[in-house]
Amino acid sequence: MEENIKNLNEFLADLEVMTVKLQNYHWNVMGKGFFITHEKLEEYYEEMREEIDEVAEHILSLGYQPLGTMKDFMQNSEIQEAKNEKIKSLEIVKSVIKDLQILQQKAIKIKQEAENKSDYATSSMMDAYLQNYSKKLWMLNETIK
């Protein structure tokens, strides 16, 4: 179980950093596609805030402590912060695709480990995230064609 908690905490850290990154992009988007990108980014980071709460509470329900400081999140996230500067919609979409792929791969790993340990609650939670990330990736990839 300890390995799965470590992975859940890393996933939590990725979600936290990704949420801040999406909000940064929301404030700094410019150029063609501004309105759609601006609205979609807000939708994404609001949704991820719910995921953050779900994952943290799930870790607690398993009897462990979720990460809770920005320092912890930054040290345990594979997702990198965005620069605080203006950025075009197309660059944002490409970055979000890359980061969603990271989240998707981590969710797959967590699901597989949870299944191996008969932790069906964790496995089920990852199913919902995987479905969500797959749909977002499909839509974002269609956007850059």
Image (spheres, grey):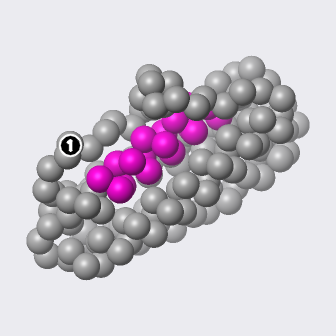
Q: Quadrant of residue 30?
A: bottom left
Residue 78 picture location, percent across and down: 42, 32
Q: Would residue 114 appear left or right of 107 to someone viewing this image?
A: right
Q: Is residue 11 magenta?
A: yes
Up-down relation of residue 94 to residue 106 (above or below): below
Q: Quadrant of the C terminus?
A: bottom left
Q: Quadrant of the N terminus?
A: top right
Q: Is residue 7 visible from the viewing direction of this image?
A: no
Q: Would residue 14 appear left or right of 20 to someone viewing this image?
A: right
Q: Is residue 59 visible from the viewing direction of this image?
A: yes
- Rendered residue at 61%/53% (across/down): 51
Q: Secondary structure at mark 1?
A: loop
- Rendered residue at 45%/59% (across/down): 45
Q: Amino acid at mark 1?
A: Lys
Residue 67 picture location, percent across and down: 60, 29
The secondary structure making up most of the magenta span is helix
The residue nearer to you, when weighing 107 against 23, is 23
Q: Residue furthest right?
A: 118
- Rendered residue at 69%/55% (across/down): 127
- Rendered residue at 40%/67% (across/down): 42
Residue 98 picture location, percent across and down: 35, 48
* Mark 1 residue crowding within 10 angstroms, few (<14) / some (14–19) / many (20+): few
The residue nearer to you, when weighing 135 against 49, is 49
Q: Which residue is mark 1?
A: 83
Q: Is residue 115 magenta?
A: no
Residue 83 picture location, percent across and down: 20, 43
Q: Quadrant of residue 88?
A: bottom left
Q: Would residue 137 appear left or right of 1 to someone viewing this image?
A: left
Specify the segment rendered in magenta.
7-24
